[in-house]
Image (cartoon, rainbow, N blue to C red):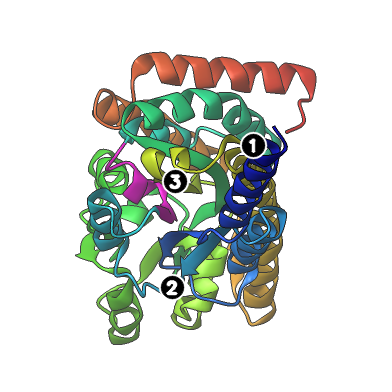
Amino acid sequence: MKLHLVTATLLLALASGQAAGAAPTTLKFATILPQGGPWAAAMTRFASDVSRLTRGQVVVKFYFGAVAGTDEHALARMRSGQIQGLAAATASLSGIEPSVRVMELPMLFKTPDEFRYTLRSMQPEFRLRYAAKGYTLLGMAGIGWVRIYSKLPLNSLADFRARKVWRWSTDPMAAALFQVVGVKGLNLSPSEVLPSLQAGTLDTVYGMSHIVHSLQWHQSLAYVLDLRITMAIAGVIMRKDALERLSPAHQKILLERADIMAQELNTNSDLVNTKSMQTMVRSGLKTVVPTGAFYRDLESTRDKVWALLRGKLFQDADLKKVQSLITICRNTSCKP
């Protein structure tokens, strides 16, 4: 009896030792975001927290600065299992689940609170849809209001049509907006924008203030239209099977810390975009407030743009739900 007890104790001790000394699980995430900035800081903190709370058994490693290639290349690598996760704009993540782009429809939201309340309310549904495709949506965050920047002031739709406007070649939402407004647009990658502005082949662009500032586009521009076209959104996803290989306790830690990371990304986005806009204004960028007539003309194009995208980037039921949430928010002074 004593021999059996000693043997059982030794076996238990050996099993415990093997578990404690098991090799850690490494989860590789790709992103085109550069290392160093407020968004990278939130991701780095998430990785550090996961490692600390799992006692080193789960290691999250971010490959910043497009080390793993463009979003499209990283998405292909994640699908093949070379990496386990991706942090990217929803324009890229929509390659897996396009319905999330209902949140980026032009002239949908008017305030940050409306956007965040609606995003928080819709996120559980988006998570279910990504899960059905084999992925876990760890979190989504607004990364900045998109505005229009130009060398000459924009005071009407006619002004807009007369400009040489950049259009991101891979974005169907911009294509729909330009089609309705009657702007031809020059299809270029972001890296081609600055030399085109400098050469004069472009005179109008759109984007978040942080991007316009950090890529130095503002140095060739003089005006910004004080109108929130849309909120740009990013998300962090990972392969569902990679998450499920973790123990339940480690899954819980990773998901909880991912929620905190998403909150940090939202907060940091406000700070970095506000700071960028203030810096550009101090350097001479002038704000143009649209007249009532110009605003109404722009707003009148909204439904036509949505009609072009309905059934392609979003479903009508999703838009109705989003609009219902916005109405609730406007009637109750909602907070995210």
Instruction: Locate residue 308 relative to residue 151 in the image: left or right.
Output: left
Q: Residue at x 25, y 51 (%)?
A: 183
Q: Earlier in the sequence, mark 2 or mark 1?
A: 1
Q: Position of residue 255 (x, y in %)?
A: 60, 41
Amino acid beneath label 3: Ile
Q: Earlier in the sequence, mark 2 or mark 3?
A: 2
In-front residue for pair 253/237: 253
Q: CA distance from mark 1 to mark 3?
A: 49 Å
Q: Is residue 212 visible?
A: yes
Amino acid beneath label 1: His
Q: Secondary structure at mark 2?
A: loop
Q: Is residue 290 visible?
A: no
Per the rendering, the mark at residue 151 is 2
- Screen quadrant of the C terminus: top right
Read off the residue under disc 3.
Answer: 237
Amino acid beneath label 2: Lys
Mark 1 vs 3: CB contact within 8 A? no
- Screen quadrant of the N terminus: top right
Callout in the foreground (2, 3): 3
Q: Position of residue 168 (x, y in %)?
A: 28, 59
Query: Which of the 4 quarters of the picture holds residue 318?
Result: top left
Task: Identify the magenta region.
Answer: 85-96
Per the rendering, the mark at residue 4 is 1
Q: Residues within 10 Å of mark 1 (few under 14, many from 20)?
A: few
Q: Residue at x 29, y 81 (%)?
A: 200
Q: Residue at x 49, y 83 (%)?
A: 219
Indicate whether 8 appears above or below 186. above
Instruction: Locate residue 275 relative to residue 313 in the image: left or right.
Output: right
Q: Residues within 10 Å of mark 2 (few under 14, many from 20)?
A: many
Q: Residues within 10 Å of mark 3 (few under 14, many from 20)?
A: many
Q: Residue at x 54, y 30 (%)?
A: 123
